[in-house]
Amino acid sequence: MAFKDKVQAVLRCIKYNIYHFVFIMTLFLMILLVSWWAISIKKSNSYQLMQEYQELKYSIRYFKRSLGTNRDKPKIGTFQIDKKLEIAPFNGLETALVQYLHPYWSNLVIRARPEYTAEIENKYKLKSTEFMLESFALSLLLLISIFMFYYLIIQEKKTVRELSNLWRRMSHEVVTPIAGLKTFLETLETKPLKSKEIKPLLKLAQKQIERQELLSDNLLIGQLLHERDELLTRETIEINSFCKKYFQKSYRKLWNISTDFENLHPGEIYIKGSEEGLNVVFNNIIDNAIKYGSDDVKITVATNKTGKYGIISLADNGPGFKPETLRSLFLSLRRNIQKIGGKHSGAGIGLLISRKVINKMGGDLNIGNSKKTGGAEIKIKLKLAGK
């Protein structure tokens, strides 16, 4: 690689990761700012304490002269003119805060009252403690703010990448069926085909059209769910008959889907929901079973009720979900690819749309792996009618 190319590669890397550099610089500047602020406040505090003691020293020097040259003996105790000071007998060393009353009363001193000096010290210790707490709170607040800002930038970058990937997958989902249909029509146009040759091509075309319909339904209902809350018409549905009716649809035979209804609840279970919404959810679940499962897809259908809810369980005979996949299945715009025999196509919005549809109907959709079939299991929970 030429030097110019290397420089361009480094510049592209810096441009793409500039937010990391901004974060580090902001953190560094924040540390400098807090350090400067802490040093300034500490100096100010120390200066105020020094000023207090300086005033005491001036007062002691002033009153020392007047009392020491006065022949009237000063009264021992708190100095009435300035109650910060006191007159006391003393035989120790003279300091700035303890001054002998020369020349007449050399056995007495004027000094700062110990109670007052202790009060000054305590006041500034309290100020120092308050300052430390304020500094800690400010530092923590700034640190959290910077990390939140950094996190939001990362999330925005991730969303942009995922959105780009989504558009790429959507393009693939749209273009591939169209290309297949175009090839089929061109084949019919260029040469006559026998009935046996046309049948598999027609079946393939029907499959591609069905995929397009499912993608269109997901996009449409996703947009409508985003814009309006009152999208799905609520009606009373008997879930056992709904499941049987759904899997009797002729177009499902295109995918070699077999069903097991042995685990249906013996009684009728009526829920409050939308048949249109349930159709969309079932379509997405079956589409995932086809895309990621075996060639001969088998769906085990089970129904039950618990408390105020009716439960529909759909389990396939595929490989199931990996644990790491289950943790991020419902992250918006993300497709969880499991390479199973080369099957990993899809736009990555089916299960997300399905959960939103069920949530709008007042229920919930949970995903796991079936102990019975070993494949993926989707449980739909909806409120019972009249509850």
Image (cartoon, helix red, strand yellow):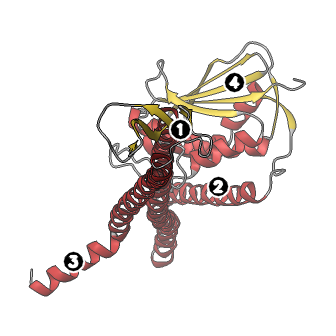
Name the residue beneath numbered marker 4.
311
Looking at marks 1 and 4 on the same chain, the residue that comes earlier in the sequence is marked by 1
Q: Position of residue 170 (x, y in %)?
A: 51, 64
| Depicted 152 relative to depicted 99: above or below | below
Q: Residues within 10 Å of mark 4 (few under 14, many from 20)?
A: many
Is mark 2 in CB contact (under 8 Å) with mark 1?
no
Q: Position of residue 74 (x, y in %)?
A: 53, 38
In depth, the one of 7 and 96 nearer the eye is 96
Q: How far apart are marks 2 and 4 (CA)?
A: 23 Å
**From the viewer's perspective, is 201 left or right of 14?**
right
In depth, the one of 297 and 96 nearer the eye is 96
Q: Is mark 2 on a helix, strand or loop?
A: helix
Q: How far apart are marks 2 and 1 (CA)?
A: 99 Å
Q: Which residue lies furthest to the right in this view?
A: 386
Name the residue beneath numbered marker 2.
218
Q: Nearer the viewer, mark 2 or mark 3?
A: 3
Q: Distance between the residues labelled 4 and 3?
A: 55 Å
Whether residue 208 is visible to the viewer of this picture, yes or no, is yes
| Depicted 111 relative to depicted 201: above or below | above
Q: Which residue is drawn at 40% across and 61% down?
A: 30
Name the residue beneath numbered marker 1.
74
Q: Nearer the viewer, mark 1 or mark 3?
A: 1
Q: Residues within 10 Å of mark 2 (few under 14, many from 20)?
A: many
Q: Where is residue 106 in the image (x, y as percent from the top left)?
A: 37, 38
**From the viewer's perspective, is 331 left or right of 5?**
right
Q: Is mark 3 on a helix, strand or loop?
A: helix
Q: Which of marks 1 and 4 is in front?
A: 1
